[in-house]
Image: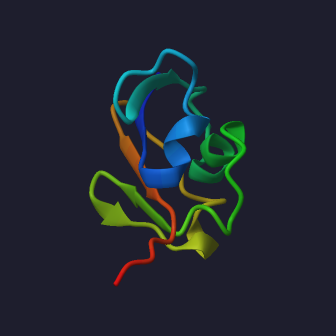
């Protein structure tokens, strides 16, 4: 099945080479969890500060059990500093 995987800010270079913009369509197995998808892109817990699936925040403690579904949109932001 396919999901859309989006990375923002300093995480964008972790997307596959040739990716245009900040999103890529990813083929995953039916039993893939959110954490397995995050791990596939070598994103550690410190980097994945804000994780959303279909616009809904998923806390870190739920990522290992959160089962992804076809057409889900996963978006991840790092911590951002500004002033």
When the figure is inspected, residue 42 is found, relative to residue 59, above or below; the finding is above
- Position of 4 compared to 66: left or right? left
User: Which residue sits furthest front?
Assistant: 83
Q: Which quadrant of the structure image shows residue 57?
A: bottom left
| 60, 80: nearer the viewer | 80
Residue at screen point 62% across, 47% down = 38
Name the residue at 62% across, 59% down.
65
* Identity of the residue drawn at 57% across and 23% down: 16
Give the quarter of the figure containing the C terminus: bottom left
- Asked where in the image residue 36 lies, by quadrant, the reply is top right
Tell me where residue 81 appears, x and y as whole percent: 45, 77
Query: Going 66% across and 38% down the picture, which residue do you hit?
Result: 41
Q: Nearer the viewer, residue 45 or 3?
A: 45
Task: Please state the horizontal and vertical placement of residue 48, each as a whole percent of the image.
Answer: 57, 62
**Farthest residue in the left direction?**
55
Name the residue nearer the viewer: 1 or 43: 43
Between 76 and 21, the one lying in front of the other is 21
In this view, which residue lies farthest toward the top? 18
* In this rendering, position of residue 16 left or right of residue 77: right
Q: Picture coordinates of residue 51 (x, y %)?
A: 46, 61
């Amino acid at each position: 099945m396919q999901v859309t995987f989006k990375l923002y800010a300093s995480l964008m270079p972790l997307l596959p080479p040739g990716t245009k913009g900040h999103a890529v369509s990813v083929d995953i197995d039916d039993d893939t969890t959110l954490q397995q998808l995050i791990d596939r892109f070598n994103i550690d817990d410190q980097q994945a500060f804000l994780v959303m699936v279909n616009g809904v925040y998923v806390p870190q403690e739920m990522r290992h059990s959160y089962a992804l579904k076809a057409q889900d949109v996963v978006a991840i932001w790092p911590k951002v500093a500004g002033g």
